[in-house]
Image (tube, helix red, strand yellow):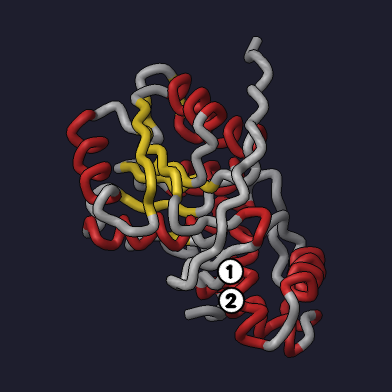
Amino acid sequence: MRSPAPRCHSAARWQRTGRGVRAEAATSMVHGGRILIVDDHPVVRRGLRTMLEGESWVSEVFEAATTAEAISTAVTERVEVIAMDVTLPDGDGVDATARIVQSCPETKVLMLTMANDEEIVARALRAGARGYVLKDTDPDAVIDALRTVAQGGVVLGPGIGPSVLTTLNRGPVELPAPFNQLTARERDILGRLAFGDTNAKIARHFGLSEKTVRNQLSAIFAKLGVADRVQAALLARDVGLGA
């Protein structure tokens, strides 16, 4: 029997900066971010670590080679963003993602893997991953993807397309697309969400409060029959919003 997921320590209240780092206050990723790289290949970890340590928005980088190390480090070190491989020596990175997100809902996970399979992509998104990028992606694009996820955005790397919705629809979460039920403003907000904007940026773009944006998104999710912003963004992209 799987042991209960450990509880995450409360995330530190990082101060916002003026360098364009933007996210909701409860889930903000700001200058001074703590990143965890989960991969069983030391060369991958060290290479990504070297690139991240050169980024001004990153303060500390941690490494883990197993799911057990990943879960433990995520909890004890209060990491804010995780680059997670799928295949690990002691288990599955998707399962580890689900446990981490359950224990530390403020932690954002980007799957970084060679596994280009729609079933795995769909399972990772259901588990709570905020994005999925293949390891053969340009290194600068990987860093950009981590930064986007850190800021509250959603990332699907090259080769990971909206067709994953077909697989998602075969799963436990139904994703109907009644876009005709959305108001014009709701469609506009959904388009910005699909583009990868955070709640803070959406609020600034439309001159709204972040609370209003959160309320609008809740209404959008209910009308679309989706559980979270990742699924909403995928569905929106499938019909051309946020392109």
Tags 1 and 2 touching, CB below 8 Å: yes
Indicate the secondary structure of the residue bearing disc 1.
Answer: loop
Residue drawn at the location 30% of the way across and 56% of the way down = 55
Where residue 113 sits: x, y (%)? Answer: 33, 42
Q: Quadrant of the N terminus?
A: top right
Residue drawn at the location 19% of the way across and 42% of the way down = 47
Indicate the secondary structure of the residue bearing disc 2.
Answer: helix
- Toward the top, the furthest residue is 1
**Crowding at label 1, few (<14), some or many (≥20) Cα neighbours within 10 Å?**
many
Q: Badge 2 is on which residue?
A: 201
Vertical side of 62 occupied by 241: above or below: below
Vertical side of 106 occupied by 37: above or below: above
Whether residue 165 is visible to the viewer of this picture, yes or no, is yes
Q: Badge 1 is on which residue?
A: 198
Give 164 or 188, whichever is nearer the viewer: 188
Q: Residue 231's image quarter?
A: bottom right
Vertical side of 231 occupied by 125: above or below: above
Residue drawn at the location 69% of the way across and 83% of the way down = 187
Answer with left or right where residue 154 lies relative to residue 160: right
